[in-house]
């Protein structure tokens, strides 16, 4: 249960990860759409408390309107980069915007993690169990090395797993 009737309005969608080519994942989109891939559900099939934490994290994104804020911030960053560089069509103008947006995204992820902690505590669930998520994702990445999952942290939109493990 979400604390103090603060649960945002959302629609939970299940998607086949192999069709999306994103592996085990969950994400929130503007408008309260939350997507959970079948691969993540299978990865955590024996850990419903961890799945609760993942969904609480995604609802944190919905509650704090991170999707819409991301669209607005990315647009503003791209416009500012184009103005500074002097060429709105240049790929070079997009680089500072992408790097700047990644920093905002990591802050949004931290805020969503804090929301997950709040929900887990309100339901009497053990925070440290969330470490299981990162351990299993690490194992999955090792097995499926290469591709988008190997982006360096400067370009990734999540804080480093070690930081997140310490938080939980």
Image: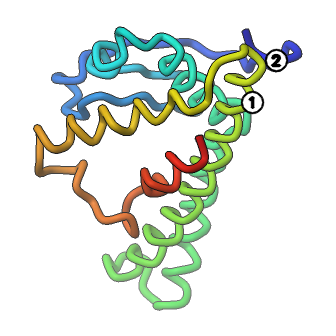
Q: Residues within 10 Å of mark 1 (few under 14, many from 20)?
A: some
The image quadrant of residue 15 is top left
Q: Is residue 83 above or below residue 132?
A: below
Which quadrant of the rendered structure holds the N terminus? top right
Residue under label 1, please give it. Answer: 118
Residue nearest the viewer, comparing 10 with 134: 134
Q: Residue at x 36, y 17 (%)?
A: 44
What residue is rendered at 58% in x and 51% in y? 70
On the image, the x and y values in percent for residue 126 come to 62, 24
Q: Residue at x 56, y 17 (%)?
A: 52
Question: What element does badge 1 sit on?
Answer: helix
For the residue carrying disc 2, how many other residues have a C-alpha within 10 Å: few (<14), some (14-19), or many (20+)? few
Asked whether the beta carbons under mark 1 and mark 2 sit within 8 Å of each other, the answer is: yes
Query: Which residue is situated farthest in the right direction here?
Result: 4
Q: Which mark is residue 11?
A: none
Q: Is residue 20 left or right of residue 158?
A: left
Position of 110 with respect to 82 (left or right) is right
Q: CA distance from mark 1 to mark 2?
A: 8 Å
Percent x, y of residue 84: 54, 90
Rendering quarter of residue 14: top left
Q: Picture coordinates of residue 5 (x, y %)?
A: 85, 13
Which residue, given by chain and number where applicable, does mark 2 sit on?
Answer: 3
């Amino acid at each position: 249960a979400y604390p103090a009737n603060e649960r945002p309005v959302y629609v939970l969608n299940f998607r086949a990860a192999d069709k999306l080519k994103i592996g085990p994942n969950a994400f929130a989109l503007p408008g309260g759409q939350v997507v959970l891939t079948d691969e993540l559900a299978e990865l955590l099939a024996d850990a419903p408390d961890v799945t609760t934490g993942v969904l609480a994290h995604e609802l944190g994104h919905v509650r704090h309107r991170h999707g819409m804020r991301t669209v607005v911030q990315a647009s503003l960053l791209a416009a500012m980069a184009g103005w500074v560089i002097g060429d709105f069509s240049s790929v070079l103008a997009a680089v500072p915007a992408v790097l700047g947006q990644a920093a905002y995204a990591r802050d949004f992820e931290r805020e969503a993690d804090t929301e997950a902690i709040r929900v887990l505590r309100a339901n009497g669930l053990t925070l440290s169990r969330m470490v299981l998520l990162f351990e299993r994702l690490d194992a999955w990445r090792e097995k499926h090395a290469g591709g988008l999952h190997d982006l360096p942290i400067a370009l990734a939109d999540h804080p480093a797993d070690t930081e997140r493990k310490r938080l939980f």
